[in-house]
Amino acid sequence: MLRKIHLLTLLAVLPALLLTAQAPRAEGMTIADTVVKLPLQEGVSMDDAVESMKLRANTLNFKLVAHQPLYKELEAMGIPSKRVEIFQFCDARIAHTMLSESLDFAAYLPCRITLIEDKDGQAWLVSMDMDKVIGMAGLPPDLLAQATKVRDAIASIMEAGANGDL
């Protein structure tokens, strides 16, 4: 009976606890501090950026494993949207190695690059700042080298897109 009362008390106060709980936030860090953003250079169309990213990924043996034209889905729902497309790239062998080290890496796979047009019409490529994750992962040297390879490949793909390198 006492166990039942404790459970009921817990259930009664749980909503209040959840409302007052706040996720920890790194001191002075904003969401902008966790991403890398590159503007498309003048004269580089969004279509050119997409083709350049695909070509660069191919030369680096990174596979485009998913493409989500989010803006088309929004428009189909009657929601006006500027262009927003999400591209997901992966090197399956490296992904397998990282997952063998820790299942936590699953949250970061595959690597995403978003092509997005801001309110002023400027196109951007946006991705997670992998240095933040790599820095706190505590990887052994062989995995650190693999993670660095992925970081460098995604940076190269973004640079190719931003510059329209075909």
Image: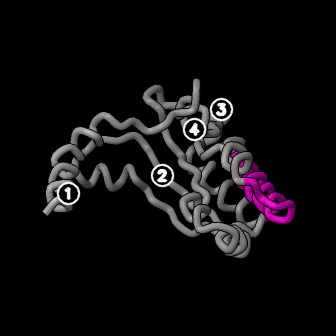
**Amino acid under label 3?**
Glu
Report if residue 59 lies within the magenta region: no
What percent of the width, then of the height, locates residue 149? 80, 58
Report if residue 154 lies within the magenta region: yes
Pick the residue in front: 61 or 102. Answer: 102
Checking the image for residue 7, the label placed there is: 1
Reading the chain from its start, which is encountered first: label 3 or label 2? 3
The quarter of the image holding the N terminus is bottom left
The segment highlighted magenta reads 138-160
SS type, badge 2? strand
Between the residue at mark 4 and the residue at mark 3, the CA separation in whole angstroms equals 12 Å
Which one is in front in this view, the residue at disc 4 or the one at disc 3?
A: 4
Classify residue 28 by image quadrant. Answer: top right
Q: Residue at left 75%, top 54%?
A: 138
Q: Does the magenta stretch mainly form a helix, a strand or a loop?
A: helix
Checking the image for residue 85, the label placed there is: 2
Pick the residue in front: 43 or 117. Answer: 117
Report the residue marked by disc 3. Answer: 42
Up the image or down, 82 lies above or below 88; here it is: above
Q: Is residue 48 visible?
A: yes
Q: Residue at left 86%, top 60%?
A: 141
**Amino acid under label 1?**
Leu
